[in-house]
Amino acid sequence: MASNDQSPMDSTEAKPSRRPKDTKFKQQKLPAWQPILTANTVLPAFFAIGIAFIPLGVALLVTSNNVKEKVFDYTQCKNIADQSQTCAEFFSNISNTGQTCVCNETVTLDSKFEGTVYMYYGLTNFYQNHRRYVRSRDDNQLHGYDIGPGDLNQDCDPYRTTSVNGTTYGYAPCGAIANSLFNDSFTLTYLGSNTVVSVLNTGIAWVSDKSVKFRNPAGK
């Protein structure tokens, strides 16, 4: 004998709260065209796209070939104060921590550089993708908010706070990223005359970095 009695579970079952509305768009019932991929249709499309991108590739190649670049390594640059050692050897001695090493490096350009010339520095064996290193900062502090020592991000340890005469102060900015800031300075001069070449240090930062990501606290 058949029975139409519902179980307690059926009678109390709640309707899904996040079920999409019963529309053609949300239920994916709109008219659509699903082409059948065959060699006769795919190969001509590949050739057409390839031919269309040839001019773009040529333009990018020409632009890249017209870029002039001069690279030099000053790691083994001689210390002016002591020509028997390089600046790298000078700083390898822990007793020279906090000292300054000055050296000269002669750079000869093989061709004339026209237009705006940019000067960059590069680092090797400087790993910035380690998880602890990447997280070792306080974004709110970098955004310009006045953060007290006790509210700084715990990920900044051990460069989070310091104690001076029993008073706890917070590092500004805190974290390993700020503590490992590259601080070499460069001065360009003309060979023979020691005339300084003017280098513009403004207008080189992204607007998002200057206005959003890295700001000083209000009034500072």
Image (cartoon, rainbow, N blue to C red):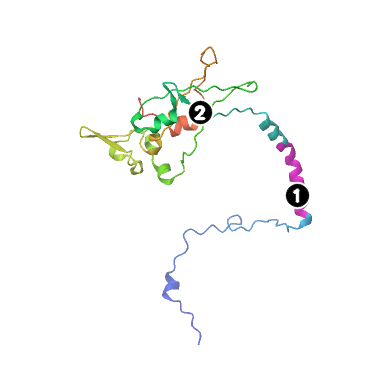
**Three-letter amino acid code of the residue under disc 2:** Tyr
Mark 2 lies on a secondary structure that is loop
Label 1 near label 2: C-beta < 8 Å?
A: no
Q: Is residue 48 magenta?
A: yes
Question: What crowding class fits label 1: few (fewer than 14 Cα within 10 Å), some (14-19), or many (20 or more)?
Answer: few
The image quadrant of residue 81 is top left
**Three-letter amino acid code of the residue under disc 1:** Ala
Residue at 77%, 46% (x, y): give it: 48
Residue at 48%, 58% (x, y): give it: 18
- Per the image, the residue denoted by label 2 is 74
Residue found at the far front of this picture: 84
- For marks 2 and 1, give the one nearer the viewer: 2
Residue 31: % across, % down: 68, 56
What residue span does the magenta drawing correspond to?
A: 41-57
Quadrant into which the C terminus falls? top left
Residue 30: % across, % down: 65, 56
Name the chief secondary structure element in magenta: helix
Question: What crowding class fits label 2: few (fewer than 14 Cα within 10 Å), some (14-19), or many (20 or more)?
Answer: some
- Per the image, the residue denoted by label 1 is 45
Left or right: 114 with respect to 203?
A: right
Residue at 47%, 62% (x, y): give it: 16
